[in-house]
Amino acid sequence: MSEDVIQLTVNGISVSVPAGATLLEASRQAGADVPTLCWLPRGGTWASCLLCSVEIQGSRRLVPSCSSPAQAGQVVLTDSEVVQRHRRMALELLLSDHVGDCIAPCQSGCPAHLDVPAMNQAILDGDFEQAGRIVKDTIPFPATLGRICPTPCEGRCRRKAEDGALSVCLLKRYVGDREVELDTPYVPSVPASTGKRVGIIGAGPAGLSAAYFLMRHGHAVELFDDRPEPGGALRYDVPDDVLPKDVLEAEIDVIRRMGAVFHHNMRVDLAEIRSSFDAVVLAVGTLTQNTLPNGLEWGNRGVKVQKGSGQTRLEGVFAAGGSVAPGKISVRSLGDGHAVADHVHSFLTGEKIVPFAPFNLEVDKSNTTFVKTRLQLSESRPRVVPRHDGLSLEEAQQEAARCMQCGCAKVEVCVLRSLAGRFGLDAAKFKGSTRPIQIDDTHDEIIFEESKCTSCGICVRVAAEHGETLGLSFRGRGFDTRVGGPFGEPLAVALKSAARACAEQCPTGALYLRHGPRHGKESEA
Amino acid sequence: MSTVAANPYESAVTRLIEEHGSRPENLIPILQSVQEEFRFLPDPVLRMIAERTGIAASEIEGVAGFYSYFRRTPVGENMVRVCHGTACHVRGADLVEDSLRRHLAMSSEDETDTSGRFTLERVACVGCCSLAPVVVVNGVTFGGLNAETAPRSLIPPIKRVDSNTRVQAATRQGPIKLRIATDSCCAACGSVEVRRSLEEAAQRYGLLGAVETVSCTGICHQMPMCEVVDPAGGSVRYTQIKAEEADAIVRRHLRSGIGGRLKSGISGLLDWFVDPNGNEGLESRVDPRDPMLCEFLHPQLRIAMEGNGVTAPLDLDAYRAQGGFQALEAVRASGDPNAVIDAVFKSGIRGRGGAGFPTGRKWRMVRDAKGLPKTLICNGDEGDPGAFMDRMLLESFPFRVLEGMLIAAYAMGIEVGILYIRAEYPHAVASIRKAIEIVKSEGLLGSMRLRIARGAGAFVCGEETALINSLEGHRGIPRVRPPYPAEAGLWGKPTCVNNVETFALIPWIVRNGADAFAAIGSKGSKGTKVFALAGAVRRGGLIEVPMGTTIRQIVEEIGGGVGEGRTFKAVLVGGPSGGCVPASMADTPVDYEALQSAGAIMGSGGMVVLDDRSCMVDLARFFIRFTQNESCGKCTMCRVGTRRMLEILDRICEGHGTADDLDRLETLAEAITQGSLCGLGQTAPNPVLSTLRHFRSEYEAHLEGRCPAGRCMKLIRYRVNDRCIGCTRCAQVCPVDAIEMRPHERHVIDDVKCVRCDVCRVDCPEEAIVVE
């Protein structure tokens, strides 16, 4: 005990730490990746989440590494089967008492995964540049889709049963239309060239989308289409009064400006194209067994592609949209194009692209309390009926104000979600009673969604560090332990100087900044 | 502070802070006093405490919300506390509570009835297990209730009878002695009233001072009991007596003494007493040679309870006459503290709190640890909701506990001692307080300073590090170990925490030698163990047996087995941290290792006997509900894990369980055991694991929709059989009109309306109502 340096072994690696160091510090020094949730680097022991627990050889029980002093000669295992099992269980239990949507149902329901809540917030803030970027992050032609989309997102809107779903489609169109009308519309930046070239056969929604997202990965694209102009079904099947050609043209023009090369009136041979490009995307729309290009295999309703890689039986040849399965709505083809672009990118560079929402907690539809509570975060008014074709600015903002911001404000930074994704967890392993679904939005700076609290106590400690007069405290005990202002005081009264720090350090979406980088996501801007 | 000038609480808060001090560790005593004054903790008072003391508001809120003793909302005029200890549960506490709620028109969620007259509170255990099921109304304990009789406890006026106001130093004069114990559970049986009548009668017949208040006899199943001791030799015990019989008892012994009385047998007055099973006509006079009593007492060996039923708890002379304080004086005279520790070590005594850590080793660690001042803590936060050994020892043998502490303090060189006693034990606190005064005035304390800290209702505070946090004025949350309290405990200084019973055994060890103690018991478990024997056993009470005594001896010999026509099924040992020992393993001895390998633990001494009417799944659920309620809520595994286990058990008991649920229970149990930080969490799954191990078939029956014991309400129905004579009583008492009145005909219960309250079955004179 009197020695200044302690020697121990972590995962077979010998480490020396100063006396008084914790097992967490020793483990990290040995390069072990030990997750934490309730831990604050500033020291002091709390040990609540138990995610950092490790195994000490010779001991039956696991110990929380964050609060256990390293002892000489210990043989520590941070990743043994026992530890893994324990961690999964701790996470599953935390998740079973965590009520919220990681991703808003509208966003997960949209085949293109448009971040609807973020778009609405930007509209509400009057920041249309930001709104444009958010939309164009997932939808290359919003003004176009905004006129024809059958809106699967609105079908999933939590507000639907209350007073009508949000007009997501018209809002998206509003954002798209503003872009279309600009002299210098937003053209997504393209990273440094990878030197790879991708040939895309078909310039319909799937092909255009694939081109757009491939260029955003830094690849050069050339599109080949047998018709005179790009757009496919969007141009040739949709009547002009529904989708004016200039709108479509303006949005395709952005893709052109990003660097896409279009070849028209060309019927091309797959083998030939494959031989002159690093990869090929087949996006020709509906195929029959007779029109199937040579060398490809027929699946059920179109080209057979491998699940997970989007690749056909020919190496480097991918397929998307109607050529895989016919009758897709445009937004679905668009989503397909995005997905195939990611697959091609992985094929070309070996870089793994994290699929959309590897872990997503979603509140059960039957939970009406959840919806009723969220209404508090939005304006209560019925769905706006536009007076003209499309929404006016005023109407758009009124409608955007109806958004209940269902998705989690910290979806990108939530520790619980990131670990759940990493461990490939099933959110529904344990079901049962949960914390109350309540939102405290009394504070100017921050919002507290109680049902996403993990009782980690970080905010309680942070508030105390700031010397708040009231601060935050634990209330009750056991499963019913809650966090909040003492004596039932709301956040507005309880927190003064510490509010921001509390929200920033909360490991989940329980406490978040009202006007912070919405959804904790670093915007491209 | 002009804003609070008009505050009605102003003066009280000022006074209480002055009285207790304004340091963080004074918070809990301040809050306790506030609650005693206002019957709840008004928020304005809490704010004032924060302002006046400088203790953080968040800390005050945290503490006020943590301990179940503290109430945050006003209460009704009368406090009704329904005990949900293990023994009470086994004997139908749920039915009693349902009955009270029905009577007061309260839903299962309501705390106070609409008239504001009654507030109903569920309590973990009031420590009157031998009287189960128990309800405490305004401090008055009503025992042996059932669904039908429970509402009678609410009939006004309910006056508080304080047994301690009448405690007198016993005197040993007069021709005969009338001994009566009036500790908490005896008092609950009416012993205080009986004593008063005995005193009045004694006075009438010129026997001034003949009545002696003595320590707990442990013969709880026969309370109130008076032992009449004749100076000429011989004694007789009158059991289950009533106040109005006191006169006759005294008169009977007036002239002729016991011998004469037995011969004459003139009075038939006492011959109609009722035995515990309700059979009339049993003689209430019990000779010490009575076979029943011999069976109960013979296998026992009293070390911690030495002198039980003989000496007055607060009679120092009597304690000294039994060798009391000789041990302390001897070790002090020897001037060799290390020899004391060696003796304790050699005696093999292990901590009686439950875990069984060798006491001598702990003492060595504390002695050798650096840092001053060191603190000695007597852990009287008895948590097992089916046990009351500590309460009894503190109430009946306070000097012995103090002597043990003083010896320990001397051995380890400690000068500060704290007795942490459960809030639910006011009489124990009073008894110890008085004993400390007496010991102090006799100059026995030496340089030791002793004080009492009252708990505030948190089972987890029985865990030593949680207890220490509580003493420091915080939420009772366990600390991560290491460091152990022996190295860094209270205020970061070396601290020795021992259980009440451990201390009570120390003087005997010192007086009689380590070898004498080590000669009692089994290989790894030395000496005696006190158990609170309760549940479905004929003779319940507090017993002290040598380690190594088998469960069978305890249940069958001492306890007299289970009731007529019932079969012994299992015993629950170790409370919520323990498990069950099935009847098939009844030859398991009381021994730390043997009990553990049987799937239970020694625990602190709760032993609840179960017969065929006890449902093992229901009991597993009972214990998980308990630990779940008592979890401090800090760690994920215990906070959420035990709740999920409870929900699964709820499902199973309601007939909605699936085979997967059993797997899920086992997975959760393993994870909670392995991953929890403190003893509460680590042992919480034990009752489930042990019932699954020994009674898996009962779980499986529930999955098929059957409760073999006929306990789980959702799986049973009440039916009238052909013994029904059509007396209509059931129809009259049914609270939900589920039985139509049909004079002279066999009655029928409408199963849809029936709420399974059990009232009709209890009331039926023909035993014609059965549970299926």
Image: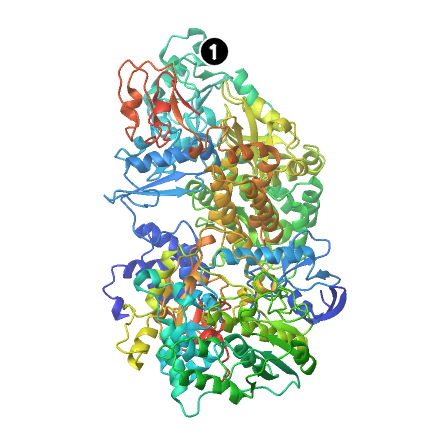
Q: Residue furthest front?
A: A290
Judge by depth and name the residue closer to the eye, A318 or A90: A318
Residue that appears at 61% across and 88% down = A192
Q: Residue furthest bottom?
A: A183
Residue that appears at 44% across and 20% down = B277
> Where residue B643 sits: x, y (%)?
49, 49
Question: Residue B19, relative to residue B697: is it above or below?
Answer: below
Is A246 on the left-hand or right-hand side of A46?
Answer: left
Judge by depth and name the residue closer to the eye, A267 or A431: A267
Question: Can residue B231 be seen?
Answer: yes
- Quarter of the figure that contains the N terminus of chain A: bottom right
Q: Which residue is mark 1?
A: B259
- Chain ID at mark 1: B
Q: Secondary structure at mark 1?
A: helix
> Where residue A374 sits: x, y (%)?
36, 64
Residue that appears at 40% across and 73% down = A148
